[in-house]
Amino acid sequence: MEEFLKDLLKNTLHYGQLLIVAVLVLVAGLWIIKRLSKWLRTILEKKSIDPTLTPFVVSMTNVTLKVLLVVSVVSYVGIPMTSFVAILGAAGLAVGMALQGTLQNFAGGVMLLLFRPFKVGDFVEVKGYAGTVKEIQIFSTLLTTTDNKVVLIPNGSISTDTLVNYSKMPERRVDLTFGIGYECSIDEAYSALRDVISRNDKILKEPAEPFMAVTALADSSVNIAVRLWVKSEDYWSVYFYLNEEVKKEFDQRGISIPYPQRSIHINQ
């Protein structure tokens, strides 16, 4: 019994020291990895690396270093690596089945970086949300909406869903329809629209001149379609400008914008 107690005390002290050192190494390693991640992000930003790649590279490096740190600590404690690898394999299979959605998001992030349907700073619409891309991380993408909300969307769903990138092309077309009364002159309405368009320098003449035409003789109005091209970043300013200025110009010229109306005939 005395020999057993001596061996027990000896082993306890030995493995206790190993465990304390392992914990200290783990804590110090996590702190160093955090500092390295910040340093790597700073270096990539100073080197003018594509901002789309920076968050992904930093996240990948962070995860890889943490895995290596855990393997090193486990090896230092004295757990045989063959047994550890076997345990990791079995655990990996179970975790993989439980986290198949997460793995899909990781694969989706890789696909997004390979095919580049959008980059950081683009204005996109996906999964019912529209906003500016702030970061593409390992498992998700961060959008900032126009009302300054942060939306986190899994990469897996982005890679398999329909996505609209409003910033991909340098120009966008503004499509609007204005209705005038049947008693109003179509030529006068054209003249008013041309005057409004000519007062805005953001409206382009390429790739096409501003276009206008009657599209429908509707129940209550004659509908005139207006199509013109602008820089992508000027889309909304021109859109709001046209709606406001056309109304003012129509009012000055006595061109009515009729309400929906219906004629009722009563037979007595």
Image (tube, grey):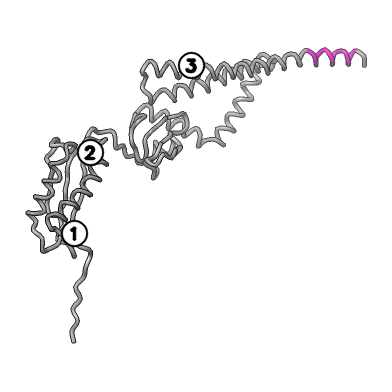
Indicate whether 164 appears above or below 18: below
Q: Secondary structure at mark 3?
A: helix
Compared across the picture, whether 37 is left or right of 129 comes to right
Examine the structure image and report whether residue 8 is included in the region drawn in magenta. yes
Residue 17 screen position, x and y as percent? 75, 13
Distance from label 3 to label 2 (Cα)?
39 Å
Q: Residue extending furthest bottom?
A: 268
Residue 129 screen position, x and y as percent? 39, 43
Answer yes or no: is residue 81 visible. no
Label 3 belongs to which residue?
Answer: 39
Q: Which mark is residue 172?
A: 2
Residues rendered magenta in the picture: 3-13
Distance from label 2 to label 1 (Cα)?
27 Å
Compared across the picture, whether 51 is left or right of 242 comes to right
Q: Quadrant of residue 6?
A: top right
Residue 226 screen position, x and y as percent? 16, 48
Examine the structure image and report whether residue 257 is included in the region drawn in magenta. no
| Total marks in image | 3
Q: Which mark is residue 257?
A: 1
Rendered residue at 72%/14% (across/down): 18
Residue type, label 1: Ile
Residue type, label 3: Trp
Q: Name the residue nearer the viewer: 234 or 52.
A: 234
Q: Are marks 2 and 1 in contact (CB under 8 Å)?
A: no
Q: Quadrant of residue 231?
A: top left
Counting residues from the start of the chain, the first of labels 3 and 2 encountered is 3
Compared across the picture, whether 195 is left or right of 151 comes to left
